Amino acid sequence: NKAIVVGSAEHILDTFLAHHIASDRRVVCVTSGGTSVPLEKNTVRFLDNFSSGERGSKSAECFLADNYAVIFLYRSGSLFPFSSALKKMNGDSNTFNSSLLSRLDVDGSGNICFCSTSTAGSTEQMMMKSLKHDIEAFRRYQHEKLFVAISFESIDQYLEKLQMVTSKLAPFRHRCCLYLAAAVSDFWLPPDKMNEHKIQSADG
């Protein structure tokens, strides 16, 4: 994921939207994943949730298929669009994962292909085909500048970046929408209520 975003989020977003403002393409901001809530300014403890980001990532795929330009505002480490097959491969066995990935190759044009000596079973072959399709789809949407990803960790970062995105989408008027699939915490601690350092358990 980190390789996709280079530079500041605001600069990346400006460049992305400038590419689409003169066209008639629709733009959507899809939020995805959970938010962490720090309990101290120098954070030691925080509240979090277990959102995988599956709804947001799958929804982003659907918007791309429907010819939207997608701003994917996602929690770092949550599920990314076109990564379901890779997630299934990971499973609980790193040995199986490494073995399976070793059967993929890249051809002279940079496309994912299958090694000619592959002896993968039918289930593994189906997963590799799904991965190949997902990788090629993702590359195509990136090449056509239809997808940009911006990450967040805490609820403060989420709100700050969402506000930035919405303000920059204003010129698109009826051509833009917000699809808020992120599992945003319903608890928030304002900075003036936070301890500077770790809350001591003995203090209750």
Image (cartoon, helix red, strand yellow):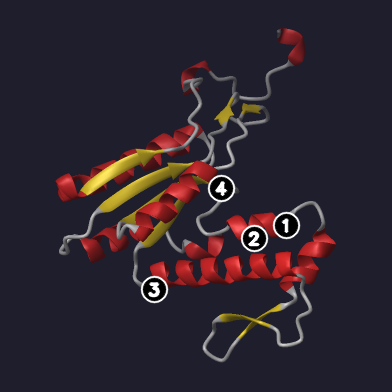
- Mark 1 → mark 2, Cα distance in angstroms: 6 Å
Label disc, if present, on residue 90 of the rendered structure:
1
Upstream in the sequence, badge 3 or badge 4? Answer: 4
Which one is in front in this view, the residue at disc 3 or the one at disc 1? 1
Around disc 3, counting alpha carbons within 10 Å, would you say few (fewer than 14), some (14 to 19), or many (20 or more)?
few
Type of the residue with mark 4: Ser
Instruction: Name the foreground residue: 179 vs 203.
Output: 179
Residue 28 as seen in the image, left or right of residue 174: right
Secondary structure at badge 2 equals helix
Type of the residue with mark 3: His
Upstream in the sequence, badge 3 or badge 1? Answer: 1
Upstream in the sequence, badge 2 or badge 4? Answer: 4
- Mark 3 → mark 4, Cα distance in angstroms: 23 Å
Around disc 1, counting alpha carbons within 10 Å, would you say few (fewer than 14), some (14 to 19), or many (20 or more)?
some
Instruction: Name the foreground residue: 19 vs 96.
Output: 96
Which one is in front in this view, the residue at disc 2 or the one at disc 4? 2
Type of the residue with mark 1: Asn
Picture quarter containing residue 123? bottom right
Furthest residue toward bottom: 108
Q: Position of residue 61 (x, y in %)?
A: 43, 55
Q: In which quarter of the image is the C terminus?
A: top right
Upstream in the sequence, badge 4 or badge 1? Answer: 4
| Residue 109 visible to an observer of this rendering | yes
Type of the residue with mark 2: Leu
Label disc, if present, on residue 86 of the rendered structure:
2
Secondary structure at badge 1 equals helix
- The answer to whether the residue labelled 1 contacts the one labelled 2, judged by CB atoms less than 8 Å apart, is yes
Residue of label 4:
76
Residue of label 3:
143
Residue at x 60%, y 23% (from the top left corner): 39
Which one is in front in this view, the residue at disc 3 or the one at disc 4? 3
